[in-house]
Image (tube, coloured by chain):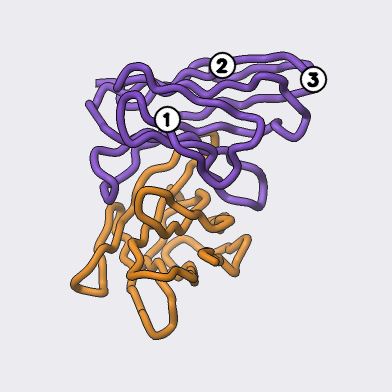
Chain colours: A orange, B purple
Amino acid sequence: AQSVTQPDIHITVSEGASLELRCNYSYGATPYLFWYVQSPGQGLQLLLKYFSGDTLVQGIKGFEAEFKRSQSSFNLRKPSVHWSDAAEYFCAVGESKLIFGAGTRLAVHP
Amino acid sequence: NAGVTQTPKFRVLKTGQSMTLLCAQDMNHEYMYWYRQDPGMGLRLIHYSVGEGTTAKGEVPDGYNVSRLKKQNFLLGLESAAPSQTSVYFCASSNVVTDTQYFGPGTRLTVL
């Protein structure tokens, strides 16, 4: 069955610290992978996506993600977190029909 | 260019009532989607459309109907609302199947 797992429900980091949000997937074919961010009371905004090619993908707001086929992972990273990064982050896999993970809520301490 | 808009933003229904949620996009996108978001469950696809006049079932279609009579609009209907349909509903659209999905701001629905 196709699925996406985000093992961390909540993560708290200090401003300026590095961040890694984990995402593992189960998908039959070569996956299309996405990371979305949702600020409180808002819709979702695409951070980055992977379709093929270079396994390290750059996105908006200084985020990047690395596709590791052997580990079925697509982890999101940022070298230095800003207070405005506090939000909920969703990993998704699919083509015409996206399957979303349950999300990771990020809190940033000053 | 408003992107994806949803009407209404909030609604409270009683069990058994019906309502329609409207999604509109001004980006000339072919694909449109309806999701529901529940705490701890991420977003789940209800129905989607790959073009005007076509619809297809997603992951959780029961209790919902949809119509795509115009390319820019995608309607989600609840014929007989149930408390289990209390959720936040998001509409999204994309140009092609592998393209970025653009999301609306959401509709918060409460069924009493």
In the rendered image, residues at marks 2 and 3 fall on the same chain: yes
Distance between the alpha carbons at the discs numbered 1 and 3 = 26 Å
* B83 left or right, relative to A17: right
Query: Which amino acid type is marked by label 1?
Result: Gly
> Label 2, on which residue?
B20
> Mark 1 and 3 residues: CB-CB less than 8 Å, in contact?
no
Q: At 33% from the left edge and 70% from the top edge, which residue is drawn?
A: A30
> According to the image, label 1 marks what residue?
B104
Of callouts 1 and 2, the N-terminal one: 2
Q: What residue sits right under mark 3 in the picture?
A: B15
- Of mark 1 and mark 3, the one earlier in the sequence is 3
Question: Which sits earlier in the primary sequence, circle 2 or circle 3?
Answer: 3
Question: Residue type at mark 3?
Answer: Thr
Q: Secondary structure at mark 3?
A: loop
Chain to which the residue tagged by mark 3 belongs: B
Mark 3 Cα shell of 10 Å, populated few (<14), some (14-19), many (≥20): some
Quarter-wise, where is residue A77 in the image?
bottom left
- In space, the residues marked 2 and 3 are separated at their CA atoms by 15 Å
For image coordinates 54% across by 58% down, the residue present is A101
Q: Is residue A45 above or below residue B111?
A: below
